[in-house]
Every structure is written in C-alpha cells, then in structure tokens.
C-alpha cells in the first residue's frame, strides 16, 4: 500500500461551489461537514448555558438567576449537550466523514437517507432552539413525569417533539452505518482487518437501532399525555411514573455508550498511529465494544435505585453495572499496553488521547461508587453524580471527539493546524476540566445536591474553584475554533498522509476525491501494520 | 477528475442497469444492502411498538378487571372485519411481489391497487370505530366518562388503545402512501425480474404493519373475553 498518491486539483470540497451543492449533497464527507457545523453550534449554545450555571454558582445566594431561570438553564444545557452534541458528535461528524473511507467504500449504503438524517437532525434542533427562544424547559433533561406531563409550565411539548424528531436521525444513521459496514467493505477488508473505529461504530449503531426507538415512543407517550390528555403515566388514574423512568433509561443509559463507544474507537486509531504499534489485543478491543453495547442494555435501572424498585432487581442491576466495568477496563488496559515500548509521537491528537485516558479512568472508577447500592443512596442527586458523568461524557467522549477531529482534520480539509496551539488547547482543557469537576466530587460527597441555584456558604470555596476551572475550560474549547478556521486558509498543505498512518483513508489524497478513491482499493493486511513499515517519525 | 479515475469509472459502469446507483458495484450488492436496511428498520419498529406494549403488559397485570371491561367496549365485529381485511391485503401484497418477480407488470399494478384499496378499507372502518368512541366519551382526557369503580383504570386502557391503534393507523397511512408510489413506478414499467427491490421492501413493510395488527387485535379486543362472554 506504500505508494505515492497522485494529487488531483479537484476534490470533494472544490468540485462544486454552490450552497445548493452542499445542502443537497449525497456525499458522506460533505454531510459529515454539515453535521460538524450544526454540532459545533449546539456545543457553543450548550456552553453558554453551562457558563451561566457556573456564574450563578460562584456565590451561595441566588443573585444572578432566579430559581426558575436556573432550572431552565441546566435543563437546556443537558438537552443541548446530550442530544445535539454528545450523541451525534463522533458518529455523525467523524463517522460520516471517515467510515466509508476507512472501509474502502465510495459512500455509505444509503446516501439519500444520510442526507435526510441530517435534515431530520437539524429540524429537531430548530424545534429545540425555538422552545428555548420561547422560554425554554425546566424539567431537567430527563423529562420525568408527572412533572413534565402535568405541572411544568415551560415548553415541554416543543422540546419533546424536537428530541423525538432528532431520535430518528440517530436511528437512520445507525441503520445506514450497519448496512454499510456489512455490505460495502472493499475487497479483502475482512471483519478482523477492520479498523477498531469501525467496530466501535458498528457497536454504537446496534445501540442506536435498538435503543433509540424506545426513547422515541416514550417521548411520544409523554407528548400524548401532555398534549392529548391520554393517561399512561398519570398517578391519579393508577398510572405509574416510574414506568416512564424505566422506559427513559432503557434508552438513555445505553445512550451513554452511544456517546462513549465511538470516541473509544477514535482512541484506538490515534493511539496506534502515535505509538507506531499495532493495538494490543485487537480482537479483545473489538469484542469489548460489542460487549459494552450488549451489557449496556441490562443496567438501566441503576438510575432508579432510590425510585422504589424491588431490592432484588436492584441487586441484579447493581451487579450488572459492575460487570460493564470489565469490557471498559479491557479497553483501558489494552490501550496502556499499546503505549508500552511504543515510539510515542507527541502530537496534538495524542495529547487528547492522554487526556482521555486519565479522565475516563476517573470517570469509570467513580461510576463503581454509584453502582454500589448502599453508597448510591448517599450520592444520588448530588454533585458527585454530576462530576461522574461529566468525567465520562466530557472528559471521555468530548476528549475522544477532539482527538479524532485533530487526527482527521488534515484529511477533511487538506490543511495542517498549528500543533503548538493544539497541544495548548489539550492542556488547557485537561487542567480546566479537572479543576471544574474535581471539586464537584467533594461537594457531592459532602452532600451538595444537584439542580439547586443556592447552597450553604461553606460550599463556596469549592464552587469558586469549579467556576474558575470552567473559565479555563472555556478558553481551551474556544481555541480550536480559531486555529482550525485559521488553518483553512493559512495552514500548511497536509498531503495524503501527514501522520504516516496506516488505514485506507490515508491512501487517498487530502481532501479526498468526491468518489473517495481513484480505484477501489484492495486490502491485504490488518488495520495497524505499523511494525511492518519502515516509517520513522519524529 | 484524473484520467485514471475516468477509466476506472467507465470500466465499472459501462453497461449498467438504470436502477444501479453509482456507489454500488452491482445490482446484487445494492439489493442485499437495501434488504438488510429494511430488516433493520423493522427491528427498530419492533422496539418502537415494544415500548407501548410494555406499558400495556404492566397495566394489564396490575388492572386485569379494567382490561376485561375495557376490551368488551370495543366492537369485536368491526375489529374482526378489519383483521380479515388486513390479512387479505397481505395476500394481495405477496401476489404483487410474486408478479413483479415473474415480470407480470400489469398484474403487479393490479395487485398493488387491490392492496391499497384494502388498506384504505381498514382505515375507513377504523375511523368509524374512533368516531363511536368519541360519541360515547371513551376518549381519555377531561371529557372521559365511564361508569363504575374501575373508571380510572379503564381510562388507562383506552389511553393505550388509542396510542397503540393510533400509531398503527399512522403506519397504515404511510404504507398506503408508499404503495401509491410503488404502484406508480410499476405502472411506468420500472420493475423487471432483475430489479424489483422497492416492491419487495414495500411488501416487507406492509406485512410488518399487518403483523402488528395481528398482535393488537387479540391484545385489545379479545383479552379476557372468554370469561365474560354472555
């Protein structure tokens, strides 16, 4: 595969220029870019809500936001970040762009459906933004009944419909990816030659396809109940609000794996490339993705330990929640073993990987505290939970997303960004993140509940630390926006393979041709043949 | 586009079927991808209805008496008639697929139209069933009226009745729209024994919606009826 790439001046970015050629494109690479734009907008929006929350919490009194506005802020922060950033970020942006390239296909199996998914996603996002402009929602992103169905005076209906619509984008993307991975692989690309990112996307798609319809029908039931006065969860009729929680978490817990599995796939790609080694225990890493996807469906009730479920089922769900730690640990150990005796190349994507490893480790281990039945009673609905899931979702998923974005950016745009700035951003994010969420573990342990806009004065020091960390984090997240945009015009030309990486996406030019490869590639070796290559770097 | 690419492009796409999309190697690959995609879609549909059926199961276990009373309020004759109509439409659908497979183009159009007519018949009957419920104030909400101590639980039964049959009816409406498009394509002689994927996949969807009803009919109309038959 070691050939020089004939560069064509025409590529997927410049072969057509009109706005319509972007908005009506069937090209998976362009659709990936379209997702990037919407997801980045949502990330920025969600960040503003987070900033307001942290500003409010710098003082014990409620001086910036009223209790009601504060409720809306954390709800909209959650809704935006979960449904419009974390779920689509890696699969819809990086997966769309890179997956067909990585398996040697011309496109995904259903290009029109792919474009439709983006439109559905965007329409769902517009619904949600409209509800925000009208005044927002105050139920928490979990929409628990009967508050959401009966008592809340905020715009639950519009937001609910928005999230419902967005769910279909996720379903269709998952379906598209599964069929693509099954049917569109290049000759010689066997399952065990697939890059681990593809295994991760496949497992994620499985969760999207099986889980998302359940949240769709659950939100539809909520909409029926609120809008049409059907009584499915209404306790006055003998309905069961806990049923809503079961249905909600049947999707929303696996959704955590939708958020974390694809970034885990990114980590495998990046860590192999920048250690110049095969991923240690390829098949274990591949199957641990599937194991996480399967186990992930069997742990949802650990969100309901204090909701009055039977102690026997709580026992089983607690055990299964511990069990999910096994495949996650398999991955972490294998990545660490990959680093061992590797020729570590200190580039920006790798910096994000190191950040991921540290933060995911803390996030994962604190999850075990919450899976323990006794301890969970003390920690439920405290800042400990908030810190835990931010370590997984932001520390894990967003770090992985940034690692991937920095890894494939030269492929997407054909330009290199400033590596020093990239490393600085990674460092700022890592430091800022720990400063923001580290103190929240202690706050939670000391008993500070989540979702309150006032707190006792003795918690102020830790809250100020947290808010200070958030401002560093904000700078860290804003930096890439500038150096990425700068690189588009002034960045060095990347060439086909700036990282000297294996993988089919690096055998075609950057940015790739509209049809990806001049001729369909034929695969003759595994995904990470770094040891076979004489490719000294740095 | 570099020269090599054009050559490769023409090599692969020299004399291809008009329905073959550019990113597939051949019709077989395209057909297999589409079929797998449709089956996966049906899996998502199973999960979608599954959420409602879970709610149904929970409350049926909790409130068996209300379920028995509620189900007796449903019109078993109209429901039974609709069941026969839908099973019949699955037969005509299967015959449409068979005709497309053998290249009988006029028969394909005929069976598809027959299927659409049966689908519309179902919807019209459903409309009259709903109308009756509105007149009797059996629609959940502020105007719900039902005699007896089980009234609140019966309201949950009717909530699930409307949610389940409503979502099913929506699928029927989408199905009729889908069939109309496929009929138009068949009328324009777009299908050959070599390529009739839309008819086959439309058929899969239609059968699925039919099977959902095969579950809904006993769950809603026949539940516990044997104990209460007069």
Image: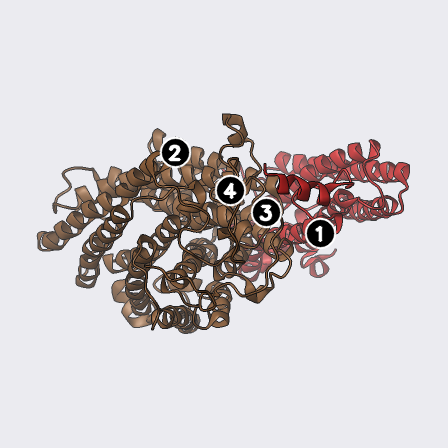
Chain colours: A brown, B red
Q: Are marks 4 and 1 on the same chain?
A: no
Secondary-structure class at tag 2 = helix
Nearer mark to the viewer, of 2 and 1: 1
Q: Chain of mark 1?
A: B
A405 relative to B18 in the view: left or right: left
Q: Chain of mark 3?
A: A
A447 relative to A277 in the view: left or right: left
Q: Earlier in the sequence, mark 2 or mark 4?
A: 4
Residue at the spot of label 3: A108
Q: Chain of mark 2?
A: A
**Who is closer to the viewer here, A342 or A154?**
A342
Quadrant hosting residue A277: bottom left
Q: Which mark is residue A439?
A: none
Residue at the spot of label 4: A7
The CA span between labels 2 and 3 is 30 Å
The CA span between labels 4 and 1 is 30 Å
**Who is closer to the viewer here, B126 or B223?**
B126
Secondary-structure class at tag 3 = loop
The CA span between labels 4 and 3 is 24 Å
**Who is closer to the viewer here, B5 or A171?**
B5
Q: Position of residue A28 (x, y in %)?
A: 54, 42
Q: Are marks 2 and 1 on the same chain?
A: no
Nearer mark to the viewer, of 2 and 3: 3
Looking at the image, which residue is at 42% across and 40% down? A413
């Amino acid at each position: 595969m070691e050939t020089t790439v004939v560069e064509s001046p025409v590529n997927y970015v410049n072969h057509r220029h009109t706005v319509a050629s972007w908005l009506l494109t069937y090209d998976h690479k362009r659709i990936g870019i379209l997702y990037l734009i919407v997801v980045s907008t949502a990330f920025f929006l969600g960040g503003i809500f987070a900033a307001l929350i942290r500003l409010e919490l710098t003082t014990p009194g409620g001086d910036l936001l009223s209790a009601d506005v504060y409720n809306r802020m954390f709800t909209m922060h959650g809704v935006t970040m979960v449904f419009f950033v974390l779920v689509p970020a890696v699969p819809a942006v990086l997966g769309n762009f890179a997956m067909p390239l990585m398996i040697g296909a011309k496109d995904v199996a259903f290009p029109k459906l792919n474009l439709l998914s983006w439109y559905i996603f965007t329409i769902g996002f517009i619904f949600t933004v409209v509800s925000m402009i009208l005044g927002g929602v105050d139920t928490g992103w979990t929409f628990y009944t009967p508050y959401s169905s009966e008592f809340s005076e905020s715009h639950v209906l519009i937001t609910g419909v928005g999230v419902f619509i967005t769910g279909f984008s996720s379903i269709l993307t998952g379906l598209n990816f599964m069929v693509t991975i099954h049917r569109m692989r290049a000759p010689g690309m066997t399952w065990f030659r697939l890059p681990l990112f593809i295994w991760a996307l496949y497992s994620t798609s499985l969760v999207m396809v099986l889980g998302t319809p359940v949240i769709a029908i659950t939100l539809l039931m909520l909409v029926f109940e609120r809008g049409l006065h059907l009584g499915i969860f209404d306790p006055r009729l003998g309905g069961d609000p806990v049923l809503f929680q079961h249905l909600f978490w049947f999707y929303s817990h696996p959704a955590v794996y939708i958020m974390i599995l694809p970034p885990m796939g990114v980590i495998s790609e990046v860590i192999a490339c920048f250690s110049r080694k095969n991923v240690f225990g390829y098949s274990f890493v591949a199957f641990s993705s599937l194991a996480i996807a399967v186990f992930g469906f069997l742990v949802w009730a650990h969100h309901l330990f204090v909701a009055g479920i039977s102690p026997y089922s709580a026992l089983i769900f607690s055990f299964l929640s511990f069990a999910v730690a096994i495949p996650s640990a398999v991955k972490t150990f294998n990545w660490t073993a990959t680093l061992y005796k590797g020729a570590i190349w200190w580039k920006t994507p790798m910096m994000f990987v190191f950040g991921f490893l540290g933060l995911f480790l803390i996030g994962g281990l604190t999850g075990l505290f919450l899976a323990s039945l006794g301890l969970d009673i003390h920690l439920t609905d405290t800042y400990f939970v908030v810190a835990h899931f931010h370590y997984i979702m932001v520390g894990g998923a967003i770090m992985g997303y940034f690692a991937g974005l920095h890894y494939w950016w030269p492929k997407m745009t054909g330009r290199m960004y400033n590596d020093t700035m990239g490393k600085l951003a990674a460092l700022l994010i890592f430091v800022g993140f720990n400063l923001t969420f580290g103190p929240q573990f202690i706050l939670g342990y000391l008993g500070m509940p989540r979702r309150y806009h006032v707190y006792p004065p003795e918690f102020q020091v830790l809250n100020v630390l947290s808010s200070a960390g958030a401002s560093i984090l904000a700078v860290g997240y804003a930096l890439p926006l500038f150096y990425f945009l700068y690189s588009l015009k002034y960045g060095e030309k990347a060439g086909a393979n700036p990282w000297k990486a294996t993988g089919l996406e690096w055998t075609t030019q950057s940015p790739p041709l509209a049809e990806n490869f001049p001729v369909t590639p034929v695969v003759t070796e595994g995904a990470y043949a770094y040891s076979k290559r004489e490719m000294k770097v740095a | 586009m570099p020269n090599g690419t054009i050559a490769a492009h023409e090599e692969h796409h020299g004399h291809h079927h008009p329905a073959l999309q550019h990113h597939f190697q051949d019709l077989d690959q395209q057909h297999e991808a589409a079929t797998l995609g449709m089956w996966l879609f049906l899996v998502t549909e199973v999960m979608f209805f599954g959420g409602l059926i879970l709610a149904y199961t929970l409350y049926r276990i909790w409130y068996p008496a209300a379920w028995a009373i509620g189900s007796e309020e449903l019109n078993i004759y109209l429901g039974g008639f609709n069941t026969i109509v839908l099973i019949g439409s699955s037969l005509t659908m299967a015959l449409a697929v068979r005709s497309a497979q053998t290249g009988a183009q006029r028969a394909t159009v005929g069976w598809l139209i027959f299927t659409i007519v049966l689908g519309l018949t179902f919807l019209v009957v459903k409309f009259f069933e709903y109308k009756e419920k509105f007149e009797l104030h059996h629609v959940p909400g502020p105007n719900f009226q039902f005699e007896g101590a089980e009234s609140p639980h019966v309201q949950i039964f009717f909530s699930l009745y409307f949610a389940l049959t409503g979502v099913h009816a929506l699928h029927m409406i989408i199905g009729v729209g889908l069939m109309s498009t496929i009929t138009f394509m068949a009328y324009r002689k777009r299908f050959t024994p070599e390529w009739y994927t839309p008819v086959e996949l439309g058929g899969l969807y239609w059968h699925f919606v039919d099977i959902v009803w095969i579950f809904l009919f006993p769950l809603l109309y026949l539940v516990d009826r044997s104990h209460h038959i007069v």
